[in-house]
Amino acid sequence: MSTRLKSVPSAVVAAAAAASAAAAVVAAAVAAAASVAAAAAVAAVAVAAAAAAEAGAAVAIATVAAAIVGEISSSRFGFQPVTSPQTVGVPVHAPERGAAFAALGLSPALVRAVTQEGYETPTPIQAQAVPEVLGGHDLLATAQTGTGKTAAFLLPILQRLSSKKSPAIRALILSPTRELAAQIAERADAYGRHLGLRNAVIYGGVGQGAQEQALKRGIDVLVATPGRLLDLMSQGLVRLGNVEHFVLDEADRMFDMGFIQDVRRVVSVLPKERQTLLFSATMPKDVVALSRNILRNPRRVAVAPQETSAKTVSQSLYLVPKQQKGQLLQYVLAGEQVTRTIVFTRTKHGANRVSDALQRRGIGAAAIHGNKSQSARVRALDAFKRGTLPVLVATDIAARGIDVDEVSHVINYDLPNVPESYVHRIGRTGRAGASGHAISFCEPDERSELHAIERLLGHRIPLLKAELPPLPPEPPRSEQPEQRRADGSRDGRPNGNGTRSFRPAGQGGGARRGGGGGGQRRRGPAR
């Protein structure tokens, strides 16, 4: 007998004798032990015996069983100790589902949530950012779109909040667009489903009644756009004095949209002692300057240089007259590989015009931009996500909230004025390692924008050609001499005398409806 068994105290052995029947079962199992599985069986029998015996005997049997298992796993039998519980038939080295997320320091509840979302391994930005945020550090993070930035800040913040409960707002996440805010809130609900935390999202374009009710019930995490947040703060409905974690997402777009002053107003009322995270798809000088003001000794993480586009996206270019962009768009959309497409325009009016033209030709399309109602934008995005709407026409501002997988093509109908916006646009396709295609239309007046984009990329965009019908000749313009009124002012629209008048609507010629001038007053309900 080894020293391991000899070292069992006599009092313990005596207590074990009081449960001789159970000990006999243990001994029988030991005699039959010939494999690691048998050793596991010995441990199971010992636990059962301990549960059935007197308290003192239970301790004795458990102690003896532990010594026996150690004896079995010694060199005498050639077994190796098993330090972690394994199910029968599962190799010792088999990784558990979600183990890669657990290795980042995330709690079992969060690991369970991400595995339920289908996540298997952290993305590079998550692997770098999560430990830093869990450690309480401020963070300055650069990552291309579609790389998992939202989970990179939500997961560690939710874990830190879950350690205690409070009715006050403890985490504030600022987003530049309504769509992005809604998606962040949806992700917060999904990741925190097992934590019991309460989340809410507030943005403009909709009534604030439901948002007020959510705030009154008490929330832990608030996701907001700057404008609506300041409105509710001015009404005394939002108080940020207990915020522990502040996230500024898409900081570069905040500058582009002119929200930076609103952001500074929000930051001015936050507690000085807080954790601040700044995430941005690109890192222009303005964002770097802002980070110096709101971050304290931040850790810096970046998973891709800001000058490069996604490697999974193939890029191509058409040089096309402005008048033929519509024809070229139809030509591209007719391709067999084109399944789900985002078309970018520079202006809201341009988005409406392109969408209407596609609809007239039987192509399912909808436009989203700042002038669209929130309900219309939500309907369009939902249809696009479901695949019932093949083409979404968007401006740069609205596009920051588009998070849709399996977008096959991005088409730059108009080239962006800001080169970094090109990188963001094409990042809507080729997400999560999938391949995608970015096609740009360049008219003669957009050559300067093209050169700026290519300088940012560091390479030329490959040129394609399309066989399009020639443009019809422009109709001749009628040359009418400019006519002036008797008082010397220029005419606007034609009146009965063949001249044009710039009178405001309702002040044209004819009898007045409101009386005066001898005209008869029109009776009946106002129209």
Image (cartoon, grey):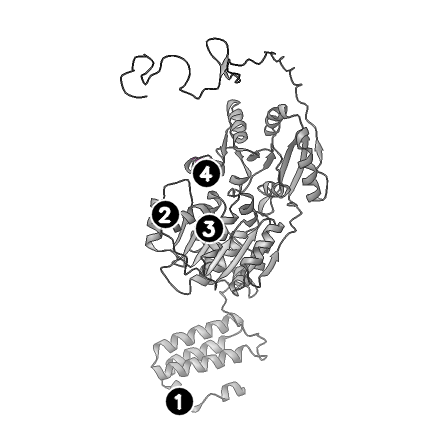
**Can you identify the residue that label 3 sits on?**
187
* Kind of element beneath mark 2: helix
Residue density around tag 4, few if under 14, some if 14–19, many if 20 or more, within 10 Å: some
Q: Residue furthest top?
A: 497
**Looking at the picture, which amino acid does disc 4 mark?**
Asp
Q: Is residue 334 above or below residue 181?
A: above
Marked residue nearer the N-terminal end (4 or 1): 1
Asked which secondary structure carries label 4, the reply is helix
Q: Give the mark nearest the N terminus, 4 or 2.
A: 2
Mark 4 and mark 1: span between their CA atoms?
73 Å
Residue shown at the point (55%, 74%) measured from the top left:
81
The residue tagged 4 is 382
The answer to whether residue 89 shows anywhere in this view is: no
Label 1 Cα crowd, 10 Å radius (few <14 / some 14-19 / many 20+) = few
In the image, which is nearer the foreground, mark 4 or mark 2?
2
Of mark 3 and mark 4, the one earlier in the sequence is 3
Q: State the image coordinates of residue 416 (x, y, percent, origin top left).
A: 61, 37
Give the image location of residue 42, x and y in percent.
46, 75
User: CA separation, marks 3 and 2?
Assistant: 18 Å
Q: CA distance from mark 1 to mark 2?
A: 69 Å
Looking at the image, is mark 3 or mark 1 earlier in the sequence? 1
Please tell me whether residue 483 is drawn above or below residue 327 in the rendered image: above
Report whether 249 appears left or right of 465: left
Image: magenta residue range: 376-382
